Amino acid sequence: MSGVDRRERLTGRLDDSLITARTIPRLAPGLLDRLRNVPDTSSAVSDALDELGRGGCVPPAALTSVWGDDVVVGQSVTLRYRRLDGDVSTNRGAGRGRVFGDRDLYGLAEPGDVAVMDCGGTRDAAVVGALSARWALKAGIAACVVDGPVRDTASIRDVGLPVWSAGTSPQAARYRLEVAELNGPADLCGVPVHPGDVVVADRDGVAVIPVDLVEQVVDLCERGLRDERELIEVIDAADGLEDLVARTAKGATPT
């Protein structure tokens, strides 16, 4: 999207000071496609992150897919919310918590990016619903990954936007949360996420790759896939369990 005036993609309803970065570090073309070609992507990425000692993963018990079978790989743009004090009536009267950051987050993104939302531990106020999902698709968002609730899940499925969330709530975040920061450091269930980091999400969970490690992770995933395919050939060629044990006795085997 080089040459695009991003101001035309933003609503203008948020104070500019809330946007920490309008652009994110971009990866070499083709790198993410290589990662998408690795089966069981989040598991492969998790193994690579273990070897490198950075990044992290979130299990599906913590972040669940609205769909169930989506596989998404994309660079992240981030939005962080904070809880308002006071009750809904008080905040409504004071005009607090009326403007949200999802539309502008989508405007800061490029097609194929993943919108990451950190709700600061909130579990009773939804930050993505049917209208937000439609806006995200119009912006080319690949998925939303929300450490917090969403709502209108039947409509989100109808729209076709992949979404992972910490749960659902019929209550909107309006008058309950406010925008803290766009494109700054965020958190997914204890895993740090920075703008540009790669998010891998599938039915096994969500993995976060620091942007400076992506090439190493891709190399490790491809190497692991080659090793796995070689082991599959050994398993399939074995005459029985005893033969398989004998053929693999020299070293550790992956899961």
Image: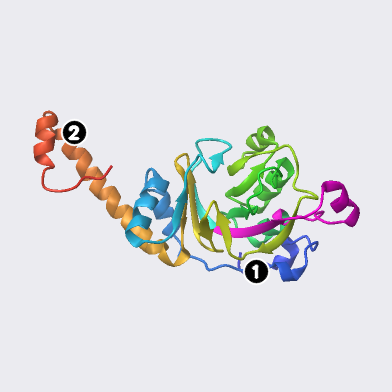
Q: Is residue 113 visible?
A: no
Amino acid on which disc 1 is placed: Arg
Image quadrant of residue 16?
bottom right
Q: For the point 43% across and 54% down, which residue is it?
A: 33
Q: Which mark is residue 236?
A: 2
Q: For the point 61% across and 48% down, which residue is it?
A: 146
Left or right of 75 in this view: 180: right
Amino acid on which disc 2 is placed: Asp
Image quadrant of residue 23?
bottom right
Say how many tags the image has: 2
- Range of residues picked out in magenta: 76-102
Circle 2 residues within 10 Å: few <14, some 14–19, many ≥20: few
Left or right of 6 in this view: 116: left
Q: Quadrant of the C terminus?
A: top left
Circle 1 residues within 10 Å: few <14, some 14–19, many ≥20: some
Q: Circle 1 sits on which residue?
A: 22
Secondary element at tag 2:
helix
Q: For the point 68% across and 64% down, which residue is it?
A: 181
